[in-house]
């Protein structure tokens, strides 16, 4: 339960219970109890149970002799209904990224209530944006973060797309129109930066908010060891909000005055991987294990 009384659901995978060890060898799974837990966070339109990527990330946690907690945020699925004191429209269509701290603080508090000595977060796509944003702007009681393929949410950057800039302007204008008409929850169909159904206010919050949610603006504020991972295909051939993101982050970390960010942060690119790491799960797992150890 969050502090604004939104009930969220998840699934705790403990190595001692052997829930999803079918792809893990006997040498991967040890018998001693784990003192470490990884919270695994979905991306846009996602949830804790519908992604093979998240399941494979949980298996990686087990292989590291750690437990995993796959979780929903209030932005799970396309649209959901929150049964708090005041009913709320939730889901990816309606979420405000600024509320992410409520979800992540609730989940980290729950994790620590289970008496784990160390808690980390592995988050994918928009979940990685939310996790790193919270870590930069709020108190987040975790020891490690893995930000897996976060998109850059930057209005000016998206407006530079050579093929979709006119379409993006139209989407922004349409969303702005409905907000001005007092209809922020009006649903519009958009095709950039990803095809989706989304409320007018959420589209403005997510993509029309300048560089508020662009991690290049605040990544160096994160004082938690963080691994930023990308697929080679998305940073070399992807859209403008992914292309060369790894290089831009490296430049940010190199430029810090005392070099502290360079020590705290690491960027990594998985060869031949796309945004979902569909054909490179083993390479992703091995790279994660290397960093964790």
Image (spheres, rainbow, N blue to C red):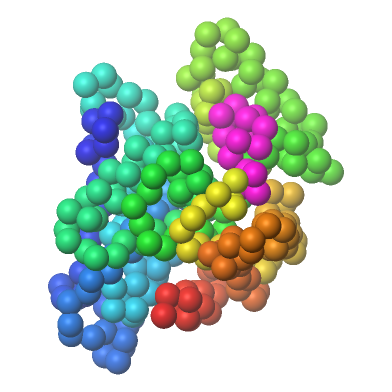
In which quarter of the view is residue 4 placed? top left
Asked if residue 256 lies left or right of residue 126, the reply is right
Q: Position of residue 177 (x, y in %)?
A: 64, 14
Q: Residue furthest right?
A: 162
Q: Residue at (54%, 23%) from the top-left corner?
A: 201
Q: Residue furthest front?
A: 258
**Placement of 26 over or under 120, stated as above or below:** below
Q: Residue furthest bottom?
A: 27
Q: Position of residue 120 (x, y in %)?
A: 36, 61
Q: Position of residue 75 (x, y in %)?
A: 41, 39
Q: Nearer the viewer, residue 185 or 39?
A: 39
Q: Residue at (27%, 36%) from the top-left corner?
A: 2
Q: Residue at (37%, 31%) from the top-left corner?
A: 90
Question: What is the span of residues highlighted in magenta in the rendered image?
Answer: 203-217
Asked if residue 140 lies left or right of residue 210, the reply is left
Q: Position of residue 285 (x, y in %)?
A: 46, 76
Q: Is residue 227 magenta?
A: no
Asked if residue 41 lies left or right of residue 274, the reply is left
User: Where the C terminus falls, by quadrant?
Assistant: bottom left
**Placement of 79 over or under 20, stated as above or below:** above
Asked if residue 218 lies left or right of residue 26, the reply is right
């Amino acid at each position: 339960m969050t502090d604004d009384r939104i009930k969220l659901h998840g699934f705790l995978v403990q190595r001692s219970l052997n829930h999803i060890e079918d792809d893990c060898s006997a040498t991967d799974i040890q018998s001693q109890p784990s003192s470490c837990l990884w919270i695994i966070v979905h991306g846009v339109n996602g949830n804790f149970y519908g992604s093979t990527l998240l399941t494979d990330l949980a298996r990686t946690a087990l292989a590291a002799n750690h437990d995993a907690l796959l979780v929903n945020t209030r932005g799970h699925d396309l649209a959901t209904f929150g049964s708090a004191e005041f009913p709320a429209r939730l889901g990816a269509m309606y979420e405000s990224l600024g509320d992410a701290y409520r979800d992540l603080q609730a989940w980290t508090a729950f994790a620590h209530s289970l008496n784990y000595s160390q808690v980390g977060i592995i988050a994918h796509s928009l979940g990685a944006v939310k996790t790193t944003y919270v870590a930069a702007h709020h108190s987040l009681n975790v020891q490690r973060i893995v930000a897996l393929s976060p998109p850059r949410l930057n209005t000016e950057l998206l407006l530079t797309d050579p093929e979709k800039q006119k379409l993006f302007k139209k989407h922004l204008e349409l969303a702005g129109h409905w907000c001005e008409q007092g209809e922020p929850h009006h649903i519009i169909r958009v095709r950039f930066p990803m095809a989706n159904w989304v409320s007018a206010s959420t589209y403005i919050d997510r993509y029309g908010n300048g560089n508020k949610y662009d991690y290049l603006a605040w990544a160096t504020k994160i004082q938690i060891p963080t691994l930023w991972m990308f697929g080679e295909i998305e940073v070399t051939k992807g859209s403008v909000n992914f292309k060369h993101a790894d290089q831009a982050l490296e430049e940010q970390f190199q430029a810090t005055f005392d070099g502290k960010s360079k020590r705290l942060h690491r960027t990594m690119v998985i060869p031949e991987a796309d945004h979902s790491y569909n054909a490179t799960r083993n390479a992703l797992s091995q790279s994660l294990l290397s960093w964790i150890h």
